[in-house]
Amino acid sequence: MDWISLLSTLKIIDAPKPAIYRCEVAWRWKSPRFTDYDFWLVLDGHGEIIHNGRSSKVSRGTLINFTPGESVEAWRYPENPLHVFALHYTLDLPVKRAREIFPSRILAHDVNKMEETVIDLVAAFEARSDEGDALAHILLKRLLLQMVVDSQTEVLNPLDLRIKEMCRKIGSEPGFDWVPAKLAKAAGLSMSQFNRRFRALVGKPPARYIIERRIDRAKVLLTETEMSLKEIAEALNYADIYYFHRQFHEEAGHTPTSFRAVGGLPVLKRG
């Protein structure tokens, strides 16, 4: 799908302007049928909403994208008031098509990240500058795209989130002394359990993942720096340069020296 063209007509409405607010004690929202789109994210609290005649509870992470023609009624629970972000926008797209593309409601996977984005969006919009306006629109497009992505992917459980975070750390610092057994202990699993869970989530065992990230980094260092092979091997936690050489060849199909010689381009094998 050509998202650039699809979202190019998006326009934030400034009345009411994008805002983050905590609902008052007597707050009860009863909106006539929308004439525009309304992006509504619950940041905290609990409440209830009737959307197109269907009643449901809302809490932190509930994300609803109201479309023209829909109606809504909502109220907060007195003991835990709602704290929400709301933004009205227009989109030059048939409403039926918009409803097919954008989910009407999801539970956001990473509410903290979305909260950071909406705070930045409000600040950019309130700057009242061409640059701020452009940034606010980019951030809204990001929120809508994230909503689509979240609707198409499974919400990870806490264990899988920890493994994903481990993968991020391994990728950002492949030269650290990563030991699968220590990773398993940090995850609270036996080595066999950790291997199974890691493979199910990532598609390969942790030892293989660590090797691949190290070789990926070695490729970058070979093509973008003048570090010697010994320096690269040591930086990536290889005590033996010959072991690094052999593992690189197994993973990349070329020796580190030949890979560097052609700037990282594949070496054509002659028959």
Image (cartoon, rainbow, N blue to C red):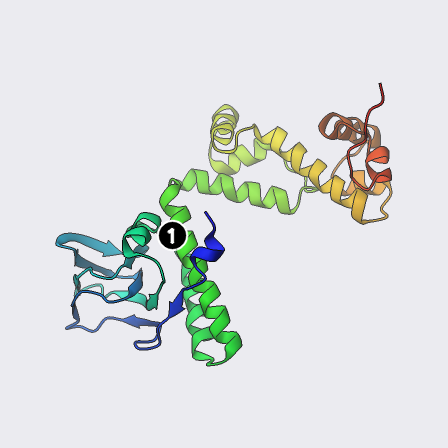
Q: Amino acid at mark 1?
A: Met
Residue lying furthest bottom: 128
- Image quarter in which the C terminus is found: top right
**Residue on which disc 1 sits:** 147
On screen, residue 160 versus residue 17, left or right, reads right
Question: Residue 127 placed where, x, y %?
Answer: 47, 80
Seen at 51% across and 31% down, the residue is 198
Question: Residue 241: x, y in percent?
Answer: 83, 32
Q: Is residue 183 visible?
A: yes
Q: Secondary structure at mark 1?
A: helix
Give 255 or 82, whichever is nearer the viewer: 255
Left or right, 243 with respect to 188, comes to: right
Rendered image quadrant of residue 207:
top right
Residue in the picture at 52% in, 44% down = 165
**Residue ranking furthest to the top:** 271
Residue 88 vs residue 248: left or right?
A: left
- Extreme left residue here? 53
Q: Badge 1: how crowded within 10 Å, few (<14), some, or many (20+)?
A: many
Residue 140 appears at what percent x and percent y? Answer: 42, 63
Front one among 225 and 151? 151
In x, y percent, where is residue 159?
43, 38
Residue at the spot 83% in from the left edge and 43% down from the top edge: 231
Relative to 261, residue 148 above or below: below
> Residue visible at 30% across and 61% down?
44
Task: Give the vertical position of 215 relative to 130 (above or below).
Answer: above
Residue 87 versus residue 250: which sits nearer the camera? Answer: 87
Q: Is residue 113 visible?
A: no
